[in-house]
Image: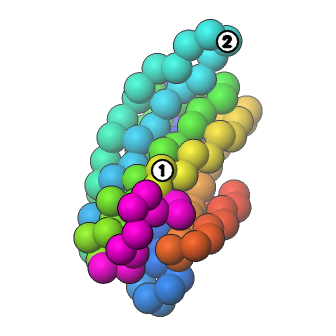
Amino acid sequence: MANGYLTTHVLDTAKGQPAAGLKISLFRVTIGATEAIATMTTNSDGRTDSPILPSDQFLSGTYELLFHAGDYLRAQGSITQDPPFLDIIPIRFGLSEDVHYHVPLLLSPYGYSTYRGS
């Protein structure tokens, strides 16, 4: 059984608080195919209630998280233009070790950043 798993969270840096209610989708990416793995919504702490990729589903490979930032920012009243500058934010990354990976998103209406967290 694998020990690896993936977690994520989102911080709204414009408001200085966790981004609650933001939809996140996870996909496994292979040559010529993309497989949907999970879709979750962040809780009041900006995190998913469980790992977005739990140990029993963990496989080494390429993955993509889609953060539905536009919907969240609209709901917060942070943006009014249509289309928004940021809408769906894709982050593609590789999982090569059987360990805990954490991929957070720091979000504002006009920019974002990410990193490999712990």
- Taking depth in this image into account, of 32 and 53 the one nearest to the observer is 32
Q: Quadrant of residue 102?
A: bottom right
Query: Secondary structure beneath disc 2?
Result: loop
Please state the extent of the stretch shown in magenta in the rendering. 77-86
Residue 40 makes an appearance in the image: yes
- Taking depth in this image into account, of 27 and 100 the one nearest to the observer is 27
**Above or below — where is 89 with respect to 31?**
below
* 115 horizontally vs 82: left or right: right
Q: Residue at x 52, y 20 (%)?
A: 34
* Type of amino acid at the residue the image marks with label 1: Ile
Tag count in the figure?
2
Magenta-drawn stretch contains 80: yes
Q: Which of the numbered marks, if any, corresponds to residue 39? A: none
Residue 42 makes an appearance in the image: no
Give the percent coordinates (x, y) of residue 84.
45, 62
* Type of amino acid at the residue the image marks with label 2: Ile
Query: Secondary structure beneath disc 1?
Result: strand
Pointer 2 residue? 31
Pointer 1 residue? 88
Q: Give the main secondary structure of the magenta stretch.
A: loop
Residue, far front: 82
Residue, far bottom: 16
Mark toward the start of the polypeptide (1 vs 2): 2
Q: Residue at x 40, y 29 (%)?
A: 37
* 76 horizontally vs 8: left or right: left
Q: Residue at x 58, y 73 (%)?
A: 110
Magenta-drawn stretch contains 114: no
Placement of the C terminus among the 4 image quadrants:
bottom right
